[in-house]
Each structure stands twice: as C-alpha cells, then as structure tokens.
Image (spheres, helix red, strand yellow):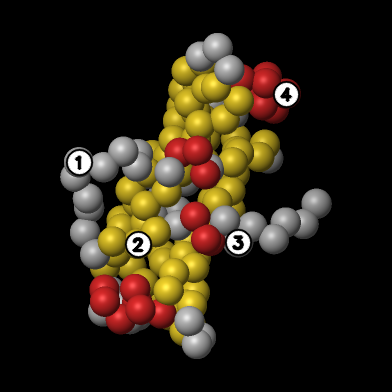
Amino acid sequence: MSLSIRNQIPGTVTSVTAGEAMATVRVRLDGGQELTAAITVDAVQELGLAQGSAVRALVKSTEVALASARVEGLSIRNQLPGTVREVAAGGAMAAVRVTVDGGELTAAITRDAVADLGLSAGSPVVALIKSTEVSLATV
C-alpha cells in the first residue's frame, strides 16, 4: 500500500497503556528518540501491538509544528530535536525537511513562520507533534 503521508519513521513499541476507549503507545524510534501515539484500544488490538512490536509512526506534514527550541509548559508530548535539511517555500506555505535521529520529517508551515523563525538549511529546530496526530502501522 502506498500512502500520501510523508512522515513515516520506523520504531519499536516500548509500552502500551490502555484506557477504556483510547490507549497511549510509546515508540522508540530507530534513532533512539521516544514518540507517543494516542490511538484507539480497538486499533491496538487489531494491529496486535505489544512491547517489541515493529511499527512505523505516520504523521501528516500539516500536523508537524516547528519551534526554535524545546517548549516547556505545553501539552504536546512529542518534541523531537533536529536540523533543517531543506526549505522549499511557495507563495504562502513552505515544506521544511527536518533530519531527526532515525529519520526525516517534513513540516508544512506558513512562509511567514519560516521567516519569523529564521529557518534555513542547518538551523536547529524542535518538531512538535500531538500524540493524537500520530498513527501507527505494523511493519
């Protein structure tokens, strides 16, 4: 199956915490960073997720925000430090490719945000991703 989701990072499930309807799944990315996905308990069961399961974390580029440094006092659990590899700016929007340990992410952000953050190749950034915006696929 081919997907339009640009961000597909391999990792391994380290824990599953199930609630009544939703579960949080912690994933250690191949580069060693931790990522949390909030998915349904049904999805956990259907995918057969357990500690040690090989997965791909999937995130649409429109759901990746960028910051110039780690942000404290924020409910967003996933903050992945990285380095800007490339900025492709259009009239209103830009695609920013970020290298993180174990993979690469693309963030679709406004051209104004690129300018405000002073982003260019080599800039250090932190990719911010809400756990509810992370989908998981088994490998």
Quarter of the image for residue 4 reads bottom right
Q: Residue shown at 51%/86% (left/top)?
A: 90
Q: Nearer the viewer, residue 117 or 2?
A: 117
Disc 1 vs disc 2: Cβ atoms closer than 8 Å? Answer: no
Task: Identify residue for label 2.
Answer: 66
Disc 1, SS? loop
Task: Identify residue for label 1.
Answer: 73
Rendered location of residue 75, percent (x, y): 31, 38
Upstream in sequence: badge 2 or badge 3 = 3
Spatial distance from mark 2 to mark 3, Cα to Cα?
16 Å
Spatial distance from mark 1 to mark 2, Cα to Cα?
16 Å
Upstream in sequence: badge 1 or badge 2 = 2
Task: Identify residue for label 3.
Answer: 6
Q: Residue shown at 55%/22% (left/top)?
A: 22
Q: Of the residues tagged 2 and 4, which is closer to the observer?
A: 2
Rendered location of residue 55, percent (x, y): 60, 38
Spatial distance from mark 3 to mark 1, Cα to Cα?
29 Å
Q: Residue shown at 26%/42% (left/top)?
A: 74
Task: Identify residue for label 4.
Answer: 46
Disc number at residue 130?
A: none
Labels in figure, total: 4
Spatial distance from mark 4 to mark 1, Cα to Cα?
34 Å
Q: Of the residues tagged 4 and 1, which is closer to the observer?
A: 1
